[in-house]
Amino acid sequence: MIEVNDIHKSFGENKILKGVSTSFEKGKTNLIIGQSGSGKTVFLKCLLGLFEPENGSICYDGRTYSSLSGNEKRNLRQEMGMVFQGSALFDSMTVEGNVMFPLEMFTKQSQSEMQDRVNIVLKRVNLIDAHNKYPSEISGGMQKRVAIARAIVMNPKYLFCDEPNSGLDPKTAILIDNLIQEITEEYDITTVINTHDMNSVMEIGKKIVFLKNGFKEWEGTNKEIFKTDNAAVTDFVYSSELFKKVRQMYLEERN
Amino acid sequence: MFFFIIRTHLPFNIIIFTITRLIFPMNYLASIGSYFIMIREVFKKPTKWRIMKSLILKEIDELIFGSLGIIIFISFFIGGVVSIQTALNITNPLIPRNLIGFATRQSVILEFAPTFTSIIMAGKVGSYITSSIGTMRVTEQIDALEVMGVNSLNYLVFPKIIALLFYPFAIAVAMNVGIFGGWMAGVFGGFSTSADFVEGIQLDFIPFHVTYSFIKSILFAFIIATIPSFHGYYMKGGALEVGKASTTAFVWTSVVIIIVNYILTQLLLG
């Protein structure tokens, strides 16, 4: 579980986060949504420890990040997995090399043990024949799956995803969403996803945090987002005609 | 500006401050500070030796052996040009013809092999380093390393520094090929006999000049490894900025090499 208490972050005079407090539960897919410039990416980078907030605290299962020593912070980071927006796979390594990289860096496993683990996670993300291919030789959807495999290969406690669906076709986007949700439940990890994708919000948003201008405007589940009266949330989530109609139908059915 | 300041009878410390600000604007000072902080980080929290070993070998192959072709090509022709230029400038019959070999040896060993080659390497190797690290920055690969808990500066820059410790080997090749080029141009161009040229090469040879050249090349190697890495690592933006960072890295690497060359020459030979 990750608990965030009143964090502030600014760059020079520009205040990005103005006191955000929330919590992300274990075994659930937690979503951060909001318009561009609302502070989502900065918030995610604070959760990852890439940015240190000026005020407030972030606790990872009782461990407050700001009070940890350098070594403890590094150990905590090894419990984190991250799926970047552009996958961020290492160009010079094959798919297998990318997934094996964290194992080579941080474990004392033998080559065969590492190979077994890589085979397991690649199979888990449905990538069987791509071991020796380079990132440039596979599709965007496959790259995302390799990034997920690399993120989970060390059995992380926390999984962070920055817009995992961006640039993917709707069908592949749903596959990636489902894969992240299955992995979250199967490995019982705390997953935080930064997204713009409203399909993801409806499908896998077990907890949704809506940011606006650096503040937490609203939080709830994908069921509650249909019922909310918060104008900022409804304006953002139901900005398309299709979603407006879906919401209308849902509310009519309920009544 | 300077005379304006003197005429206004400003206090001496304000004059010094103003001149310093004109020569070194604050952003340059901040960049120099960031560079030294980067160097400190490079040597912190080392990557596992098993991985580092393979990275170093890969960098030696790419940075040293991958550059030998261009180094040999340039050195050969530079040696030849020095030999021809010297021969064409000896118009006095009292000057011995072995001066062609002597001048070629001195020019190649003292300056052309270590300094000229390093400027070329700043372009070839430096832009490769900046663009490869810059691309990793743009595509979030460096963020991925940091999130995993890897010291990305050690992982990316340290192997390049160690690989370029073999740079004096490339300079030794450049020296030999340069002198050979001079001999070819001198003898086959009809400017000198082989015996005169070889006598000139052996004339008043001071072994410390080779040591001086190797000391220079070690320092130049460190500059070639670190300044382009700095520009790549701290770049911001997209693909266009990667190109700009490569150009800036080449300019600054060349400037620093030339300044360090001057200081070292004054210290070691002056």
Image: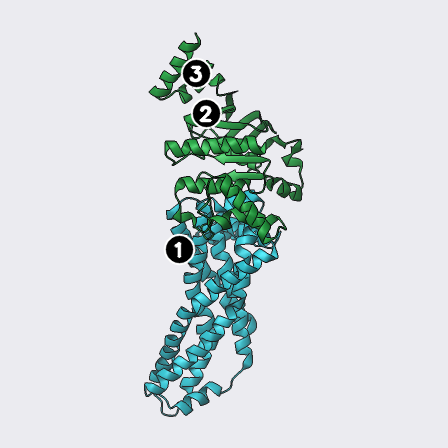
Chain colours: A green, B cyan
Nearer the observer: mark 2 or 3; the answer is: 2
Q: Amino acid at mark 3?
A: Ala
Q: Contact, CB < 8 Å: mark 2 with mark 1?
A: no
| Residue receiving disc 2 | A203
Figure check: A104 above or below B187: above
Counting other residues with Cα less than 10 Å from the Cα at mark 1, is it few (<14), some (14-19), or many (20 or more)? some
| Residue receiving disc 1 | B247
Q: Left or right: where does residue A148 sit relative to residue A71?
A: left
User: Residue drawn 51% across and 72% down?
Assistant: B169
User: Residue drawn 67% across and 36% down?
Assistant: A67
Q: Chain of mark 2?
A: A
In which quarter of the view is residue B267 placed? bottom right
Nearer the observer: mark 3 or 1; the answer is: 3
Tag 1 secondary structure: helix
Counting other residues with Cα less than 10 Å from the Cα at mark 2, is it few (<14), some (14-19), or many (20 or more)? some
Q: Amino acid at mark 2?
A: Glu
Q: How many marks?
A: 3
